[in-house]
Each structure stands twice: as structure tokens, then as C-alpha cells.
Image (spheres, rainbow, N blue to C red):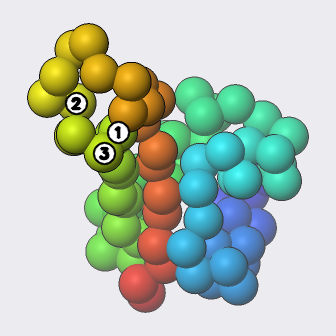
Amino acid sequence: MSLLELKEYLKNRNVVSINDLCIHFKTSPETLEPMLEQWIRKGKLRRESSGGSCGGKHSTCSCGDSEQVWYQWIG
């Protein structure tokens, strides 16, 4: 996978989760994140994350522990 392949996928999907990217490119988040950061630094991509519905304020709640990470192409 190249930066250009990643760019084309992001542009075509507009908003995509890190999980979708990992599945599509058959790789780990640790491999993708440095490439995604390059597009963020260039002002072409925005990273958004959301925790559980309480925003992670309550350590004992069951509203979802895993953070969801999304990327939106804005270039």
C-alpha cells in the first residue's frame, strides 16, 4: 500500500473508521497511523474519535470502553 492508494480510498469513502482501513488494506493500525498522520499534517485529513456515550468519565459504566477512531477526507 502506498500513500496514493490510501489517499484514493479515503477520498472515495470520505469518512472511514480505522477498523475499516485495517480490513481493507489487511494491516494493523500501527502500520496505517504514520501514513494517516502525513495526510493530517498536510491538512487533507481529519481524525475524530469517540469513546463511550459518557465520554469515558465514569470508570465503572458499561457504555462502551473502546474508542472509535474515524478519518474524514477534507482535501
Measure the C-alpha gap from mark 1 to mark 2.
6 Å
**Residue at the image position 33 percent from the left and 40 percent from the top:** 51
Q: Amino acid at mark 3?
A: Ser
C-beta proximity under 8 Å, tags 1 and 3: yes
Drawn side of residue 36 relative to residue 47, left or right: right
Q: Position of residue 68 (x, y in %)?
A: 46, 44
Please name the residue that numbered disc 1 is placed on.
Answer: 52
Percent x, y for residue 12?
Answer: 70, 84
Residue 7 seen in render = no
* Residue under the image location 72 percent in, 53 percent down: 20
Which amino acid lies under the numbered mark 2 shown in the image of this protein?
A: Gly
Real-space Cα separation, disc 1 to disc 3, in angstroms: 4 Å
Q: Which residue is identified by label 3?
A: 53
Query: Does residue 58 appear left or right of residue 72 in this picture?
Result: left
Whether 61 is drawn above or below 12: the answer is above
Q: Of residues 4 and 58, which is closer to you in this image?
A: 58
Q: Which residue corresponds to mark 2?
A: 56
Residue type beneath disc 1: Gly
Q: Residue at x 66, y 45 (%)?
A: 19
Asked whether disc 1 touches disc 2, contact meaning CB atoms under 8 Å apart, the reply is yes
CA gap, disc 2 and disc 3:
8 Å
**Rendered image quadrant of residue 75:** bottom left
Quarter of the view holding residue 58:
top left
Q: Is residue 61 visible?
A: yes
Q: Secondary structure at mark 2?
A: loop
Residue 25 appears at what percent x and percent y?
82, 49
Which mark is drawn over residue 11? none
In the rendered view, would you say 3 is above or below 49? below
Give whichever of 73, 6 is nearer the camera.
73
